[in-house]
Every structure is written in structure tokens, then in C-alpha cells.
């Protein structure tokens, strides 16, 4: 975490926009959020040490990566007494991270490795020393790269499931 904290502090003044509602890991049935969370006082958000779980007006938890990321520590799942989140359903967060090549400085010939260093999964691949891209086969959707980017160039959106065609 020290590595992440170091690079996080360099760009902590920037707060990237995130519009999509990303749910925490650890759920099996997304409809359970609608059914159960109304009866809860947001325990998962209370225990998250990274403070990335927010509770919406609909009382359903969502993640925000503007200040930190998910360590997959299990605490939110352990705290959920209504079975919406459970450690048995641990999986990567359902979010797709991408580098916006228009905003990214490295795509415009300015050397920058801010996102590479906090990515403990080595999912950010550079072409030599420029033009980074995120390898979603390696990315665990932890979100730690978002806040460190000084150009606000890392976008996050809900992953869409592929529709089957007839
Ligand atoms: S696994 Fe841990 S860090 Fe991730 S959202 Fe849950 S409580 Fe927060
Ligand atoms: S602890 Fe469980 S029931 Fe409560 S808000 Fe979080 S996901 Fe919903
Ligand atoms: S979200 Fe993906 S690319 Fe970003 S730090 Fe986490 S694993 Fe690396």
C-alpha cells in the first residue's frame, strides 16, 4: 500500500468524474440490492476502510474511485447481514477501465508513469515508454489507477454483458 499511497498523493487534488453506478464485488444476484438494501443502514459503506462505498438515495451501495480503490479485503461482504454481499461470491468488480488517449499525456509524447506504479497487477502496458493501454485480462478493476492520473484520463464504466444474437 505504501507504493499506492506515494503515487496517490501526487495527484490527489484531481477528482475524476464517474457517472456509472458501479456495485461492490461479492454479489450474486444484482436484484437483491433492490430487495434488501432498503432495510439496511448501509453497513457495507461503514466498514469499508478505503471509503469507496457510497450509499445512494435509493439506499443501494455504489463505488466511487476518485479517492481510492478496492483492496478486496472482504469487509463489506462480512458486514452484510442480509446476504446481498457474501465472500463466496467474490469476483472482480464489474467495471471496465480505459485510458482516454485524447487526455492521456503519454499519448501526446509527455513521459508519465503515474498510473503504472499503483497498478499492482501490472495491467497497464506501455508501448516502450509511451501510449499506455489497460489489459483487461490482467485488470482486477480495483480502481487504484483512477485518482493518480494527473490528466483525468482513466475512465470507468459498468461492463456490459454480451447479448446473445439469434
Ligand atoms: S472489499 Fe474492502 S476495500 Fe473493497 S469495497 Fe469491500 S470493504 Fe471496501
Ligand atoms: S450491507 Fe448489504 S444490505 Fe446493507 S446496504 Fe450493503 S449490500 Fe445492502
Ligand atoms: S483498475 Fe485495473 S489498471 Fe487500474 S490499477 Fe486496478 S488493476 Fe491496474
Image (tube, grey):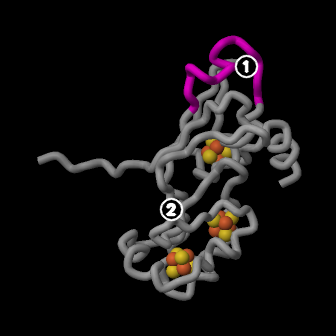
Mark 1 vs mark 2: which is more N-terminal? 2
Foreground label between 1 and 2: 2
Quadrant of the frame with the N terminus: bottom right
Q: Give the answer, above or below, for where 23 lies relative to 103.
A: below
- Residue that appears at 53% across and 83% down: 40
Say which element carries label 1: loop
Left or right, 111 with respect to 161, comes to: right
Q: Give the answer, above or below, for where 46 lies relative to 82.
A: above
Q: What residue is shown with label 2?
A: 23
Beta carbon at label 2 within 8 Å of ligand 2: no
Q: What residue is shown with label 1?
A: 129
> Real-space Cα distance between discs 1 and 2?
34 Å
Classify residue 74 by image quadrant: bottom right
Classify residue 55 by image quadrant: bottom right
Look at the image and tell me whether residue 97 can be seen. Answer: yes
Q: Is residue 106 magenta?
A: yes
Q: Is residue 62 magenta?
A: no
Left or right, 92 with respect to 105, comes to: left
Q: Name the one closer to the observer, 129 or 4.
A: 4
- Magenta segment main secondary structure: loop
Please identify the residue farthest to the left as the structure is shown: 166
Q: Name the one closer to the observer, 53 or 7.
A: 53
The magenta segment: 99-113
Amino acid at each position: 500500500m505504501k507504493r499506492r499511497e506515494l503515487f496517490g498523493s501526487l495527484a490527489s487534488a484531481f477528482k475524476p468524474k464517474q457517472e456509472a453506478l458501479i456495485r461492490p464485488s461479492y454479489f450474486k444476484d444484482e436484484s437483491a440490492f433492490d430487495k434488501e438494501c432498503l432495510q439496511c443502514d448501509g453497513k457495507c459503506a461503514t466498514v469499508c476502510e478505503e471509503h469507496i462505498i457510497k450509499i445512494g438515495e435509493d439506499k443501494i451501495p455504489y463505488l466511487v474511485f476518485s479517492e481510492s480503490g478496492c483492496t478486496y479485503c472482504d469487509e463489506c461482504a462480512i458486514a452484510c447481514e442480509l446476504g446481498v454481499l457474501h465472500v463466496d461470491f467474490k469476483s472482480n468488480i464489474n467495471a471496465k477501465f480505459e485510458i482516454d488517449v485524447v487526455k492521456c499525456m503519454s499519448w501526446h509524447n509527455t513521459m508519465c508513469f503515474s498510473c503504472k506504479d499503483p497498478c499492482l497487477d501490472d495491467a497497464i502496458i506501455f508501448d516502450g515508454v509511451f501510449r499506455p493501454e489497460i489489459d483487461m485480462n490482467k485488470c482486477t478493476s480495483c480502481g487504484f489507477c483512477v485518482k493518480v492520473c494527473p490528466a483525468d484520463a482513466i475512465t470507468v464504466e459498468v461492463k456490459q454483458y454480451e447479448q446473445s444474437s439469434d
